[in-house]
């Protein structure tokens, strides 16, 4: 199985990863994509919805907080910004959603 950001993600780095992985070929592989930006876009995917336990959601929140490049001012975005509680809540939702690619 190949899992990557969706090819239409709003962030150029995520689109680049999706494009690189699109060239990976294997016998009978399945391809799934996830949306990163904009942070609410995953709601529209929904082909495969995996519920997370409350413990997994807490672990995910803790991992996001430790991701140093996301903890302060993000300067690789055109306007630059800092992660807010709204962003954290969008990324640490109780389900993971994937689209078949």
Image (cartoon, rainbow, N blue to C red):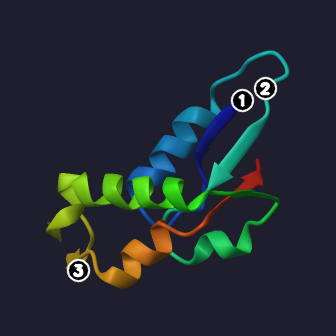
Query: In the shown orientation, is residue 51 left or right of residue 68?
Result: right
Q: Position of residue 5 (x, y in %)?
A: 56, 51
Q: Position of residue 87 (x, y in %)?
A: 39, 77
Q: Secondary structure at mark 2?
A: loop
Compare marks 2 and 3 and give the one earlier in the sequence.
2
* Disc 2 from disc 3: Cα separation: 38 Å
Pointer 2 and pointer 3: residues touching (CB < 8 Å)? no
**70 above or below 32?**
below
Q: Which residue position is annotated with label 3?
A: 79
Front one among 68 and 30: 68
Residue 1 tag number: 1
Pointer 1 and pointer 2: residues touching (CB < 8 Å)? yes
Name which quarter of the figure residue 42 lies in: bottom right
Q: Which residue position is annotated with label 2?
A: 29
Mark 3 Cα shell of 10 Å, populated few (<14), some (14-19), many (≥20): few
- Any part of residue 60 in sight: yes
Compare marks 3 and 1 and give the one earlier in the sequence.
1
Pointer 3 and pointer 1: residues touching (CB < 8 Å)? no
Front one among 10 and 44: 44
Q: Secondary structure at mark 1?
A: loop
* Disc 1 from disc 2: Cα separation: 5 Å
Residue located 14% across and 68% down the image: 72
**72 above or below 7?**
below
Residue located 32% across and 57% down the image: 62
* Disc 3 from disc 1: Cα separation: 35 Å
Outermost front residue: 55
Compare marks 1 and 2 and give the one earlier in the sequence.
1
Q: Position of residue 53 (x, y in %)?
A: 61, 57
Front one among 27 and 85: 85
Quadrant housing the N terminus: top right
Q: Nearer the viewer, mark 3 or mark 1?
A: 1
């Amino acid at each position: 199985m190949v899992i990557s950001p969706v090819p239409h993600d709003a962030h150029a780095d995520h689109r680049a990863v999706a494009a690189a992985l699109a060239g990976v070929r294997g016998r009978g592989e399945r391809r799934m994509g996830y949306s990163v930006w904009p942070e609410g876009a995953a709601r529209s995917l929904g082909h495969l919805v995996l519920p997370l336990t409350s413990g997994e959601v807490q672990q995910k929140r803790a991992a996001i907080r430790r991701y140093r490049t996301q903890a302060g001012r993000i300067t690789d975005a055109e306007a630059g910004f800092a992660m807010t509680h709204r962003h954290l809540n969008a990324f640490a939702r109780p389900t993971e959603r994937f689209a078949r690619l």
